[in-house]
Amino acid sequence: MTVPNLESLRARFRGELIQPGDAAYEAARKVHNGMIDRRPALIARCTDVADVIAAVDHGRENRMLTAVRGGGHNAGGLSICDNGLVIDLSRMRGVHVDPAAREVRAEGGCLWGDVDHAAHAFGMATPSGTVSTTGVAGLTLGGGIGHLTRKYGLTIDNLLAVDVVLADGRFVTASEQEHPELFWAVRGGGGNFGVVTSFLFRLHPVKMVQAGPTFWPLEQTRQVMKAYREFIARAPEDVSGFMAFLTVPAVPLFPEALHGRKVCAIIWCSPGSADQFEAATKAMRSVGKPLLDHVGPMPFPALQGLFDPLLPAGLQWYWRADFVNELGDEAIAKHLEHASRLPAGLSQVHIYPINGAAHRVGAGDTAFAYRDATFALVIVGVDPDPTNAKTITKWCKDYFDALHPYSAGGAYVNFMMEEGQERVQAAFRDNYTRLAAVKKQYDPTNFFRVNQNIRPA
């Protein structure tokens, strides 16, 4: 894997250039998903925007296949490539909070834990995901679904501006006022349009939240899901709770008697008061006979990091996903059937509610097209042992195949593996044509193509 004109890049690059054979190479090429095993020719670990510009110029001028890495959390490993260049932003993790303006600026290599920590000191947060080790860049560019979606919308609904290095090496700021078509496209269109070196977000007053899990025996799934679909349709937007199927892990957080048991669950979050939460959720939390109802006040960053120790980098991950409009009785039966076959370990299913504030943005107002969907479904096979990769992959695909006929047709791009162009177009619905036009304007040669790729019109 020879890198053309490497000395030319060295002369204008302040960061670290890592090649096969270097001491840092094996660690630098690893991403969060241990199922991904790719060997780039060069990893350009940037320290600032000037480094990003130099790396983009080098990749373009030397016709190198180029991937962009923010947090390295991408489901399909689309932040790394074989025999090409990886523009690695992992050293660019600066965060600046403006408490008076209620804004936070985060560099492109930040993880959500970085942002949550900085904003929490001022009693604020912006909607993000559900795991603090997730990269800010990848989650935001795909839309951003998480604990605060029902109350404050998607992450992109709180995005005010981005700084971007384009394929031709230009640096631009995109917002409603500047490069508005580019700003429209990066709000849900993924990493197709350039390297985003910083994000400016709106903040909201979120400090303590009422949070924690309620577990039910798996055999109560029908009763719980039927009650949940009615509950979440009318629940106050202050209240969020995503449904899950999981095997209770053997950790002190949960009673030993439940360790290894497959359960149906709701993971709660509400920035409202304890009394408001109790009044709004008591009936739902009392459905059937819960095994565990462990909800209480905690700092928002603690909720975001609650499951981080269970999900370290390097596990085997296989993903499938869909948007869902309703949880019908037939679909519920399929969920019970396939959740009963959960492989041992960390494999799980999440059903995220994305109604409430997210529905008040039009389908064409951002690139995120599924503004009418009620849920985002994700099925993940997770296991530390590579010898179990085939088992978790088959379970995941079988589950998806059974539930897909009951879906809205497309998936959240952040939950997708490499699944082909038809699935990419389904993810963007009617917005795909406009996205392809923006791609032609800002990246006509499809330089940024290691992603859920939108081809230039």
Image (spheres, helix red, strand yellow):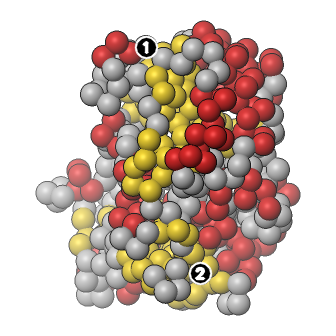
Quadrant in which the N terminus appears: bottom left
Which mark sits nearer the N-terminus, 2 or 1? 2
Q: Residue under label 1, please give it.
A: 261
Crowdedness near tag 1: few (<14), some (14–19) or many (≥20) residues, C-alpha within 10 Å: some
Residue that protrudes farthest toward the front in the picture: 275
Q: Eyeballing the image, is 408 above or below 399?
A: below
Frontmost residue, 56 versus 275 = 275
Residue located 26% across and 87% down the image: 11
* Quarter of the view holding residue 224: top right
- Tag 1, which secondary structure? loop
- Position of 288 with respect to 25 (left or right) is right
Residue located 64% across and 75% down the image: 443
Residue 232 is marked as none
Q: Amino acid at mark 2?
A: Ala
Frontmost residue, 271 versus 308 = 271
Q: Amino acid at mark 1?
A: Arg
Q: Residue under label 2, please give it.
A: 161
